[in-house]
Image (cartoon, grey):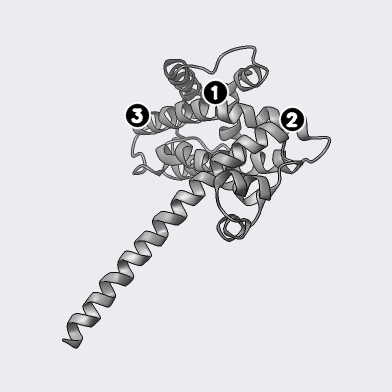
Amino acid sequence: MKERKKTAKGAKAVRDTAGSAKTSAGARERIMEAAFGVLMEQGYARASTLEIATRAKVSKRELYTLFGDKRGVLVEMIARRSARMHQALTLPPATDRAGLADTLVEFGATVLAEVCHPTVAAMFRLAISETDRSAEMAHVLDENGRGAHRRALVAFLGQMSRAGLLGDADPDVMSSQFLALLFGDTLLRVVLRAIEPPSPRECRGRAQAATAAVLQLHRPVSRT
């Protein structure tokens, strides 16, 4: 009888934990969605945690528990998109130049599409407009967006260089070359609304061209 009670209590604890996690996940999503709306309407400097919490139908205390502060919400919003960009680089390491090219193309196409996504472009516009009032949003975007995918690419290229699939150039230099060829002035023109975000086909085409150019420039060094 005691064993049955223990089992029942254990099952209830598991259900309660799962229910709590699901509730927290739902609250996180609502908070991030509400935060985006408030940011777009009021700007980063003027956006208040009270307004975000009110729209998300959570208490300020819950917002602080889940994210810490307004900056924490923004960091997670950007980190969510950045995580998608890095998925290609978490595949099993390439063992030949063809595999290296495939990974770079996949990464490049994903990064270009995500960074030029209307939501991200809107955040870049907001960060630019907010610079005089607060540079914090620009710093967060740079560190957790551009900086994050650049660091991931540098680490990957360093790994490929040590594996003998690239030349001896500094991975940081190779990363700069790849990203410069990948983006060109595309992001700037998207942010300025001069062009529409590139299509998936256009993103892949640019990624293929950037990959071909970088791999042509950095051939394996003969050890003989």
Which disc number belongs to residue 182? 1
Residue labelled with disc 3: 98
Q: Earlier in the sequence, mark 1 or mark 2?
A: 2
Tag in front: 3 or 1: 1
Tags 3 and 1 touching, CB below 8 Å: no
Q: Looking at the rendering, which quadrant does residue 101 occupy?
A: top left
The label nearer to you, 1 versus 2, is 2
Identify the residue shown where x is 68% and y is 18%.
192
Q: Classify residue 136 as left or right of residue 103.
A: right
Q: Nearer the viewer, residue 173 or 59?
A: 59
The residue at 28%/75% (across/down) is 10
Dot 1: element: helix
Q: Are marks 2 and 3 in contact (CB under 8 Å)?
A: no
N-term-proximal mark, 3 vs 1: 3
The residue nearer to you, when weighing 78 against 211, is 78
Q: How far separated are the C-alphas under marks 3 and 1?
A: 19 Å
Residue 198 sits above or below residue 17 on the image: above
Q: Secondary structure at mark 3?
A: helix
Q: Is residue 43 visible?
A: yes
At numbered mark 2, what does the secondary structure look like: helix, strand or loop? helix
* Circle number at residue 128: 2
Q: Residues within 10 Å of mark 3 (few under 14, many from 20)?
A: few
| Residue 29 position within the rendered picture, expressed as x and y whole percent measured from the top left | 49, 45
